[in-house]
Image (cartoon, rainbow, N blue to C red):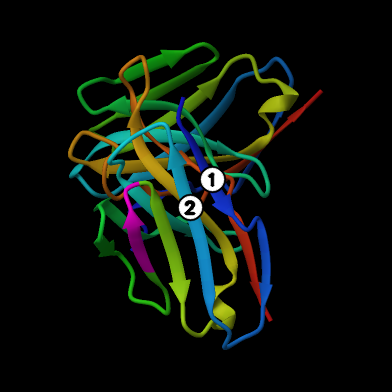
């Protein structure tokens, strides 16, 4: 049972435009969400997180939106840069923290074209 | 600052051989530690996590085991590798960033190929 789903395996965007990566979850106990960026043969790098008490969190070019009623979150990257090309994973946890089991989506490959 | 190390970076092993992957964390004490696996073309799957020395929780029944002999050392092992054990193994620890956001920090990973 895939509790966290990233339904778009890949996304292609022009440099300078907005990239929107989507993630859906089914477990209503999830209340803490994270986005990671991963390059091939490297460990994931943390980007941004959001608690379920918020519906938006911003950090520089990255903004995460959470729609609890729809069990949906999205990561917006504005403006997109070629260096953003990587695999992006969303992850979710219960208990309001990142401690314990993170459940990951399958990942979305983002390609930003110059 | 905290750092996390994994070795080896790459490993090619025959089916039926034993396995030992090591992870160490520096710059923090009593961290929660995790082992994940990323199979080809798939997301990350939690295998084990540990909240302290000698305390291991297994998430998925499998051919692997984990041990935590020291506070900042986490070891992933197998007595006999299977072809299906091939993948990218990642160690992680839980921590809080200066701005208050909590996250899991990942090591560089070990690519295991079982032939």
**Rendered-image quadrant of the C terminus of chain A:** top right
Q: Sequence order check: which comes first, mark 1 or mark 2?
A: 1
**Would residue A14 be visible to someone looking at this image?**
no
Task: Give SS at disc 1.
Answer: strand
What residue does disc 1 label?
A: B5
Q: Are marks 1 and 2 in contact (CB under 8 Å)?
A: yes
Place of residue B105 in the rendered image (x, y in percent of width and height, measured from the top left) = 44, 37
- Taking the magenta stretch, the answer to whether it contains residue A5 is no
Task: Tell me if residue A80 comes above or below residue B105 in the rendering.
Answer: above
What residue does disc 2 label?
A: B23
Residue nearest the viewer, comparing A26 with A89: A89
> Which region of the structure is painted magenta?
B66-71
Task: Give SS at disc 2.
Answer: strand
Task: Tell me if residue A112 comes above or below residue A92 in the rendering.
Answer: above
**Rendered-image quadrant of the N terminus of chain A:** bottom left
Place of residue A38 in the rendered image (x, y in percent of width and height, measured from the top left) = 59, 40
- Main structural element of the magenta stretch: helix, strand or loop? strand
Residue displayed at 48% across by 52% down: B23
Q: Is residue B104 left or right of residue B21?
A: left
Residue displayed at 63% across by 58% down: B8
């Amino acid at each position: 049972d895939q509790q966290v789903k990233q339904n778009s395996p890949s996304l292609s965007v022009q440099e300078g435009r907005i990239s929107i990566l989507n993630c859906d979850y089914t477990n209503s106990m999830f209340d803490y969400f994270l986005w990671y960026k991963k390059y091939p043969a490297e460990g994931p790098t943390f980007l941004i997180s959001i608690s379920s008490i918020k519906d938006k969190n911003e950090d520089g070019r990255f903004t995460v939106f959470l729609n609890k009623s729809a069990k949906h979150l999205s990561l917006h990257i504005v403006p997109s840069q070629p260096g953003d090309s990587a695999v992006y994973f969303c992850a979710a946890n219960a208990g309001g923290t990142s401690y314990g089991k993170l459940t990951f989506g399958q990942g979305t490959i983002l390609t930003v074209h110059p | 600052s905290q750092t996390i190390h994994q070795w080896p970076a790459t490993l090619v092993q025959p089916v039926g051989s034993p396995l030992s992957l090591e992870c160490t964390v520096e710059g923090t004490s009593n961290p929660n530690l995790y082992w994940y696996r990323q199979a080809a073309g798939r997301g990350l799957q939690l295998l084990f996590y540990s909240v302290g020395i000698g305390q291991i929780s297994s998430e998925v029944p499998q051919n692997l085991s984990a041990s935590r002999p020291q506070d900042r050392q986490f070891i992933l092992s197998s007595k006999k590798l299977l072809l299906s054990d091939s993948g990218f193994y990642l160690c992680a620890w839980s921590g809080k960033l200066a701005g208050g956001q909590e996250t899991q920090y990942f090591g560089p990973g070990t690519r295991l190929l079982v032939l």
